[in-house]
């Protein structure tokens, strides 16, 4: 006997014509400002207070959350669409603060980023954006692309409804020293790269300011600066500082004129401290952080965005996939050190925002890191807060996303049963709504 569905998820084939019509209608019908949807939540995670509430209803009108109430059937207006998630844990859409939706990592062929046209990268980005949204991640901070500004085109295509994906904060390009962690390296020295692959290359404070302006003028939401060498960039060393504190401060000051934040890729202890002292919003990776760095982060309220899952993915897969031994070695040198530093950071009360470096491992597996956050010291609630309200604060979007609260976007997901009992359950998010539009519903 075939199972009945009231709506099947996008990824399941064989829908009936009627179901397909209904799904397409729900996905693409304009959301009326008057349309009311009422969601019955068996468990509702209040990420601001760190509480689980029981038996609540969420009113969604148009693209926003109107109110949260206790269920009294008489209160639900006739004609409202009712979604029954009474057997689910309901929470705000997840946020990943470190993705690369349009990027391919540098692979065994040093020219890999050169093998794709901007158009191909844009289509890859559309595919990756859909996978990310269908994993329950309704917002990402996308921290850069080798081919500049393709991410901004993707963000705009998502915002105008052309592409299905998470809302994006986009970096536009990497600010990097020439031949540094954010440059295309490993090529024959006589190869001259096209300008859109070097849009963020800067070698002085003056050049950093110039690049920051150019990137923000082209529509970036924030600036990503590569403060140290990288694991997956040939020739560079994660422990080596590539920009000085003064050069990073130039980026922070110039971005601040535009109201934009700066986040720093930093593995080495000195590079991390340079970036914190320069006033960055967050440290990406933070692999080799020392006690002084932890103290500075705590003092200044700098967020740590540590991708503590993907070291396992690299160790298990990159050799087989043909990546150079150098990448494998640098991954070994940073993975466990990063996890030890993360554990200390959690214990010290450093602010943590969830970020996974999706692109290094397959897009759409963004939730795989959640159990790692618990394994390395966080409570399950703390891990969920890092991927919701704290991530929103890190981006500066806490006024619109990150919690289920009146006036915020109706970005709502649900996981069957008691989701906090085992965060690996987040690999199978059953219900996803973005801005009031349902993109996935449970199978019945
Ligand atoms: Zn990254």
Image: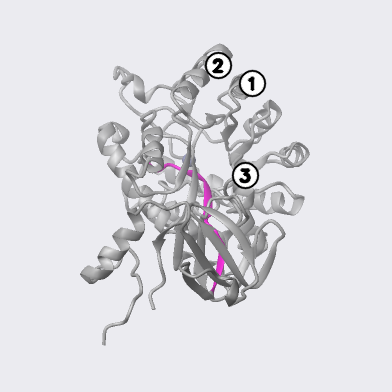
C-beta proximity under 8 Å, tags 2 and 1: yes
- Mark 3 CB within 8 Å of ligand 1: no
Distance between mark 2 and mark 1 Cα atoms: 8 Å
Q: Is residue 111 above or below residue 434?
A: above
Q: Position of residue 441 (x, y in %)?
A: 41, 68
Secondary structure category for the residue under label 1: helix
Q: Which residue is mark 1?
A: 253
Q: Which residue is mark 3?
A: 399
Which range is magenta? 88-101
Front: mark 3 or 1: 3
Q: Quadrant of residue 419?
A: bottom right
Apparent side of residue 209 relative to residue 35 in the rendered image (left or right): right
- Mark 2 CB within 8 Å of ligand 1: no
* Residue 428 in sight here: no
Q: Residue at x 55, y 45 (%)?
A: 334
Distance between mark 3 and mark 2 Cα atoms: 29 Å
Q: Quadrant of residue 107?
A: top left
Q: In the rendered structure, which disc, 3 or 1, sits on the residue that comes first in sequence?
A: 1
Q: Does the magenta-highlighted stretch encompass residue 34?
A: no
Main SS class of the magenta portion in the image: strand
* Image disc number at residue 209: 2
Secondary structure category for the residue under label 3: loop
């Amino acid at each position: 006997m075939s199972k009945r569905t009231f709506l099947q998820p996008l990824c399941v084939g064989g829908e009936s014509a009627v179901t397909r019509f209904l799904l397409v209608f729900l996905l693409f019908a304009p959301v009326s400002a008057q349309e009311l949807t009422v969601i019955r939540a068996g468990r509702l995670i209040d990420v601001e207070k760190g509480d689980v509430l029981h038996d609540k209803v969420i009113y969604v009108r148009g693209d926003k959350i109107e109110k949260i109430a206790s269920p009294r059937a008489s209160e639900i207006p006739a004609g409202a669409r009712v979604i029954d998630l009474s057997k689910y844990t309901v929470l705000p859409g997840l946020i990943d603060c470190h993705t690369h939706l349009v990027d391919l990592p540098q692979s065994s062929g040093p020219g890999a980023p050169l093998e794709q046209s901007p158009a191909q990268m844009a289509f890859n980005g559309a595919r990756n954006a859909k996978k990310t949204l269908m994993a329950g991640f309704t917002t990402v901070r996308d921290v850069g692309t080798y081919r500049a500004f393709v991410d901004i085109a993707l963000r705009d295509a998502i915002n105008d409804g052309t592409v299905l994906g998470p809302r994006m904060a986009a970096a536009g390009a990497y600010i990097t020293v020439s031949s540094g962690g954010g440059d295309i390296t490993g090529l024959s020295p006589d190869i001259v790269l096209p300008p859109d692959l070097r849009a963020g290359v800067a070698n002085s404070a003056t050049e950093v300011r110039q690049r920051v302006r150019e990137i923000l003028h082209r529509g970036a939401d924030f600036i990503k600066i590569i403060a140290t060498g990288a694991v997956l960039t040939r020739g560079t060393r994660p422990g080596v500082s590539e920009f000085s504190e003064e050069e990073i401060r130039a980026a922070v000051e110039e971005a601040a004129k535009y109201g934009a934040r700066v986040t720093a890729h930093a593995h080495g202890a000195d590079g991390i401290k340079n970036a914190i002292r320069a006033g960055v919003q967050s440290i990406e990776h933070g692999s080799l952080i020392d006690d002084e760095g932890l103290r500075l982060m705590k003092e200044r309220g700098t967020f740590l965005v540590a991708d503590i899952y993907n070291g396992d993915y690299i160790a298990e897969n990159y050799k087989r996939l043909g990546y150079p031994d150098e990448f494998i070695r640098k991954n070994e040198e940073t993975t466990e050190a990063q996890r030890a530093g993360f554990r200390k950071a959690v214990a010290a009360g450093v602010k943590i925002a969830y970020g996974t470096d999706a692109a290094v491992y397959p897009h759409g597996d963004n939730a795989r890191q959640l159990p790692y956050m618990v394994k390395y010291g966080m409570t399950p609630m703390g891990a969920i807060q890092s991927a919701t309200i704290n991530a929103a604060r890190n981006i500066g979007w806490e006024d619109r996303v990150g919690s289920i609260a009146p006036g915020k976007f109706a970005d709502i997901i649900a996981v069957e049963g008691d989701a906090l009992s085992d965060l690996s359950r987040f690999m199978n998010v059953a219900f996803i709504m973005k801005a009031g539009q349902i993109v996935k519903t449970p199978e019945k």
